[in-house]
Amino acid sequence: MKFPCGKHGRQRLEFFAAPFRPPLRAFAALVYPWREDEVLLSCIEDRGWCIPSGGVEPNESSEEAGRRESIEEAGVTLGPLAYIGCCRLADSREVRWAEAFTAEVCSLGEIDPQFESTGRKFVKLSDLPDIYYCWDDLTEAMFQHAYNAIQRQRSVLGG
């Protein structure tokens, strides 16, 4: 599937579906956490409602960063993460990569107040355009891709 391009400030965003992997170590991880047909969003200061995401620390993998960010920003424990692709963020000075995952929410815990999240909620795909902090054609396509991936994962796992 060909994904539309997006923009974030001066950066051009492109998404490449799995099995494509970034040629460089990812600087960030994005996670699409699901419970049934709803995706979990976190309310992040200065950003608004978005999926858990954040920087990959020096001694962790993108998957580990995705799990950590999901705990920090949404207070959730996730099941197996499925790699669904990566984003290329480029401007005139640099190119960076972020890896994207999807997973089932296993349990809800407390959100640690020391992190920037002020809340969480589960949202249907149809409600995302009115809620998500930065909605465009690329964001919509990535959510649909993540939803399709979790549906495939469920059928393989028998759920």
Image (cartoon, rainbow, N blue to C red):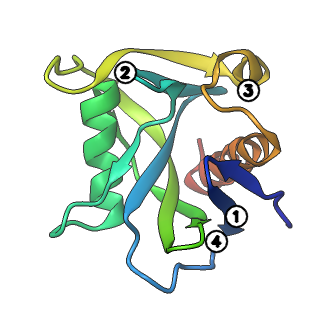
**Which residue appears at 50% of the width and 35% of the height?**
51
Sequence-first tag of 2 and 3:
2
Q: Mark 1 points at which residue?
A: 14
Sequence-first tag of 1 and 2:
1
Inter-mark Cα distance, 2 to 4? 31 Å
For the residue marked with disc 3, what is the amino acid? Leu
For the residue marked with disc 2, what is the amino acid? Glu
Residue that lies at the very extreme toward the front in this rendered image:
92
Is 151 displayed left or right of 3 in the figure? left
Residue that lies at the very extreme toward the bottom in this rendered image:
23
Q: What element carries label 2?
A: loop
For the residue marked with disc 1, what is the amino acid? Glu
Inter-mark Cα distance, 4 to 1? 13 Å
Q: Mark 3 points at which residue?
A: 125
Residue 10 position, x and y percent, is: 62, 54
Residue 8 position, x and y percent, is: 62, 47
Q: Is mark 3 on a helix, strand or loop?
A: helix
Q: Mark 4 points at which residue?
A: 18
Q: Which of marks 2 and 3 is in front?
A: 2
Label 4 environment density (alpha carbons within 10 Å; few <14, some 14–19, many ≥20): some
Q: Is mark 1 on a helix, strand or loop?
A: strand
- Residue 102 versus residue 152: which sits nearer the camera? 102
Residue 25 position, x and y percent, is: 38, 78
Q: Name the residue under label 2.
A: 45
